[in-house]
Image: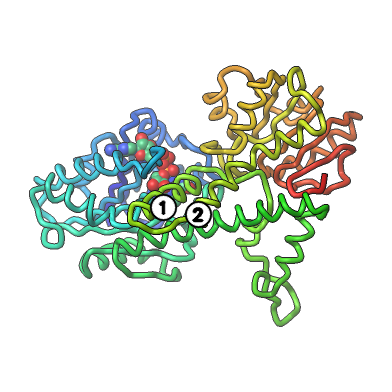
Amino acid sequence: MRIAVVGTGYVGLVSGACLASKGHNVTCVDVDPEKVAKINSKVPPIFEIGLQDMMNEVIPSRLRATGDLAGAVRGADLTLIAVGTPFDGDLIDLKYIREAARQIGEALRTHDAYHVVVVKSTVVPGTTEDVVLPILEAASGKKAGADFGVGMNPEFLKEGEAIADFMSPDRIVLGGIDARTRKVMAGLYEVFPDADVVETTPRTAEMIKYVANSLLATLISFSNEMGNLSAKLGVDAVEVMRGVHLDKRFMPILADGTRVTPGMISYLAAGCGFGGSCFPKDVKALIAHGRERGAAMDLLDSVIRVNANQPQKMLDMLTKHAGALGGLNVAVLGMAFKPGTDDIRESPSLPVTQALIDAGANVTAFDPIARHEAEKVFPSGVRFEDKLEDAVSGSQAILLMTGWPEFRSLPGLLAERGDTPVVIDGRRLLPKGSVTRYDGIGLPG
Ligand SMILES: NC(=O)c1ccc[n+]([C@@H]2O[C@H](COP(=O)([O-])OP(=O)(O)OC[C@H]3O[C@@H](n4cnc5c(N)ncnc54)[C@H](O)[C@@H]3O)[C@@H](O)[C@H]2O)c1
C-alpha cells in the first residue's frame, strides 16, 4: 500500500519506518526541513533502539521524507496523521491536527481516487468525527464516506522500545466511520497477521487510548502514594510492593512453578514520578475533556497531583541529608523521562535540576543519550559530562533520576574512588546497602 505519514516525530517516523520494512511504500511529511533532510540522509532525528538499522534498510527504496504534503497525499492510498497534540494548560491543543487536516483536505480537492485519512495522534474522544472530518470535507469539497474514508488508529508504542512494540503489536485498534474505511485500514495492518484487532468506531478508538494511558498513570501514582506512606510508617516500599506483586493475579504461576512477570509490574513501583510526552498531557486532557462534559474526574485529578509532588520528595531527601543546597556539589543522573530514550519532555529531572540551580547548587549532570536535549533546556547553570565517573567526581550528593541500567555501576565506581556522597535513588535501582550513604523514594527516613 502507498502511505503518507503527516508528522514525522517519534510516532510518525517509527510507524513509517516499520510499515516500510513490512513492504509498504511510505512518504513521511514534516514541516521541519532539518528533520526531512536528516531522514533522507538516513540520520535518525531521535534516538530509538533499532531505528538506525531500519532506516538503513528502507531508505530510499521504500521510505522517503518530504515537505510536500499535497504531493505525498495525492501519491498515497492512505494518510496517517501523526502530529503532536500538546496540552495547552486548559485543554488539548488541536492546532496541529486542524492544520494537517486542512492541508490534507486541500490536497484531496484535486484527487479523484478514494483515499482514507487516519488519525494516529492521541486525540480526545470525538475529535476525528467532530473536528477532523468536517475540516476534511470543507477543505476538499468532498463527502466523507462517499469520496474518502476517515479513521482513527491509536498508537501504543512505548518510547525506548518503540520499534519492538510496533513490529510486535499487542493490539491494533481500527476505528472507522464505515466498513469501507475499516477495510482499507485493515489492509494496512495485514502485515501483522498475529495481532489482536479491535474494529470499532473512531470515538471508541480514541477512548481506548486515553483509558489505557490513564490506567498506567494511575498505577504509578497509586504506587507513589503507597511508597510515601510506607516511608512514613517505617517500612520499605520496595519490600511492600514485592509482596503485592506476588499475588498470582499480578504474577501468575505457570504449571512448572515459574512466575510470569508482566510488564505491568514495572508500573507498580514507587519512584520520583512519571513524565514523557504522553502520560502527563493525556491524563490532563482527559480530565479537562471529562469536566467539560460534566463528568467528575476526581481520581485522575489526584493522579496528576500525586505525580506533581514526587520530584519535590527528591529535594526534601537531599535537604535532609545535605542541609542547605547553596554551594553544594550535586550530580543529577538521568535527564530522560525514562531509560532507552532521549525524550526529556516533562521529565521529573527538569524541575529538580531547576530547583537546584535556583538554590545555588553546583550542578553536574549525566545522561547516556539525552544530553543534547537537556542542554537546550539548561544552556547554563549545569555542567554536562559525557561520562558517569566525571559527573559524580567531587560530588557531595547524587540524585539518581532515571533508571538507566548503567547507573547500576555506581556503587563499584564510588567504592573504587573512596567517595562517599549521599546517593538519593529516585528509581530504587541500587541495592540498599550498596553505597555508604543511601536514601531513596519509599525508604524509611
Ligand atoms: N511519543 C510517544 O511515545 C507516543 C506514543 C503514542 C502516541 N503518541 C501520540 O502521537 C502523536 C505524536 O507524538 P510524537 O511524540 O510523535 O510528536 P512529535 O512532537 O515528536 O512529532 C510531531 C511532528 O509533527 C510535525 N508536524 C506538525 N504539524 C505538521 C504539519 N502540518 N505537517 C507536517 N508535519 C507536522 C512536527 O514538526 C513534528 O516533527 C501525539 O498525539 C502523541 O500523543 C505519542
Percent x, y of residue 43: 46, 34
- Decide if ligand 1 comes within 8 Å of the CB at mark 2: no
What quarter of the picture does the C terminus occupy?
Answer: top right
Discs 2, 1 touching: Cβ within 8 Å: yes
| Mark 1: few/some/many CA within 10 Å (<14, 14-19, 20+) | many
Q: Quadrant of the N terminus?
A: bottom left
Q: x%, y% of residue 25?
A: 31, 51
Q: Amino acid at mark 1?
A: Leu
Mark identifier at residue 286: 1
In primary-sequence order, the first of circles 2 and 1 is: 1
Say what amino acid the circle numbered 2 marks: Leu
Q: Determine the residue positioned at 9% across, 53% down.
A: 142
Q: Residue at x 34, y 29 (%)?
A: 33
Q: Residue 294: x, y in percent? A: 35, 57
**174 is higher (above) or lower (below) than 72:** below
Few, some or many residues within 10 Å of mark 2 (<14, 14–19, 20+): some
Q: Which is more toward the observer, 51 or 99?
A: 99
Q: 424 or 72: which is nearer to us?
A: 424
In the rendered view, does 213 fall on the left or right side of 425?
A: left
The residue at 71%/42% (across/down) is 426
Ligand 1 found in image quarter: top left
Q: Secondary structure at mark 2?
A: helix
Residue 24 got which mark?
Answer: none
Horizontal side of 94 relative to 35 (left or right) equals left
Residue 326 appears left or right of 90: right
Q: Is residue 14 visible?
A: no
Disc sitting over residue 300 in the figure: 2
